[in-house]
Amino acid sequence: MGVKCPHRSVMTSLIPLFIRDDDAQIFDRSTAAVRAITDQDNQKIQYGIYICQDCGKRFIAKGIYVKIKDRSGYILQWFPIYPIPAREVASEIPEPIRGEFEEATLCFSVSASRACVFMCQRILESICQEKKVSGLNDLQTDGTISKMLFDRATEVRLWAGITKHKPLIEPVTTEDAEELLNYLDSILNAVYVEPVRYERLKQKRQQIK
């Protein structure tokens, strides 16, 4: 059983802690050391305070039983909820796009998957505005993004359209949101980060020469 540490974004095993303060003293001798509660849908949710084996820092994690795609049954997935996991955003990405991407990653970190997808679409629109083009087709035509990235950007846009305008029988899962967020990360990297870092590296080589 593991979870991504919110402090360093690395996978870590869950080590339960003895929790003690002026108001409460909690110690669960089970291997998970969690307290189970029931939400409004009678779905079992688990919470626990743990320590990361990698960095030694504490964090709170939430475990939710999630339905497995194309299979019967559920699996327990863990998500850090405090501190809110931070995803590094490259400084080369201009504002307000940088702030919008941080907001998208924040939505993902608190399991607001639909909101994350909406923000991803908003960022695509902001990229087009910043580049002064009418749409994704222009970004591909002028060579700003490849055909592969254009297809992924289109997938982000189509997912956002579905989640906005159609009632969904199946919810947007964290896996769906993470995949789309990774697509967007690749697009931002190609549009803003790689060109700047390439020029920086080329200039350094020329100075050395």
Image (cartoon, rainbow, N blue to C red):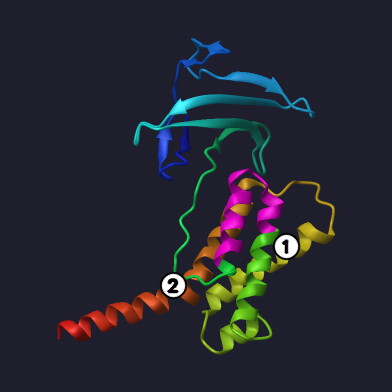
Residue 71 lies in quadrant = top right
Read off the residue under disc 2: 193
Residue 103 covered by magenta stretch? yes
Say if 51 sits above or below 20 in the image.
below
- Quadrant hosting residue 124: bottom right
**Magenta stretch?**
98-117
User: Going by the picture, which residue comes out furthest to the front?
Assistant: 22
Judging by the rendered image, the residue that carries numbered circle 1 is: 160
Camera-nearest label, 1 or 2: 2
Residue type at tag 1? Ala
Label 1 crowd (10 A; few <14 / some 14-19 / many >=20):
many
* Distance from Cα at disc 1 to Cα at disc 2: 25 Å
First in residue order: circle 1 vs circle 2: 1
Q: Position of residue 108 (x, y in %)?
A: 61, 49
> What is the quadrant of residue 199 in the picture?
bottom left
**Residue located at (74% from left, 27% from top):** 39
* Picture layout, residue 77 above or below residue 180: above
Q: From the viewer's perspective, is 52 left or right of 205?
A: right
Residue 175 in sight in this render = no
Q: Is residue 79 above or below residue 180?
A: above
